[in-house]
Image: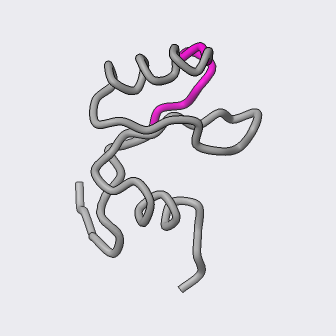
């Protein structure tokens, strides 16, 4: 199986929300709640509105049907 960006997220951040800076193309913060994630971003001096929030990230090899 090819290692995709989402697979990497599943391995590194299971059960968490992540903030992705699209300009940098990488995860800049992670947390269990939106409020926690925003607080972490503000501490790092990053405006939460400049990031894309994704999650919660599923466990690696977990299959979810919606």
Report whether 1 appears left or right of 55: right
Q: Is residue 17 above or below residue 1?
A: above
Report whether 4 appears left or right of 15: right
- The x and y percentages for residue 66 are 23, 54
In front: 64, or 44? 44
In front: 43, or 57? 43
Return the residue found at the far right: 23
Q: Which residues are magenta?
A: 46-53
In front: 62, or 47? 47
Determine the image quadrant of residue 56: top left
Q: Is residue 18 above or below residue 33?
A: below
- The x and y percentages for residue 44 are 58, 21
Number of marks: 0
- The x and y percentages for residue 48 are 53, 17
Return the residue found at the far front: 43
* Residue at (59, 81) in percent of width and height: 2
- The x and y percentages for residue 40 are 45, 23
Colouring mode (rainbow / by chain / secondary structure / one colour): one colour
* Residue at (65, 45) in percent of width and height: 26
* Residue at (50, 35) in percent of width and height: 29
In the image, is residue 54 part of the stretch drawn in magenta? no
* Residue at (58, 26) in percent of width and height: 51
């Amino acid at each position: 199986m090819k290692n995709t960006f989402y697979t990497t997220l599943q391995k590194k951040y299971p059960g968490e929300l992540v903030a992705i800076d699209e300009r940098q193309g990488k995860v800049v913060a992670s947390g269990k709640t939106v409020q926690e994630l925003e607080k972490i971003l503000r501490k790092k001096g990053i405006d939460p509105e400049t990031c894309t929030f994704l999650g919660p990230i599923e466990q690696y090899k977990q299959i979810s049907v919606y």
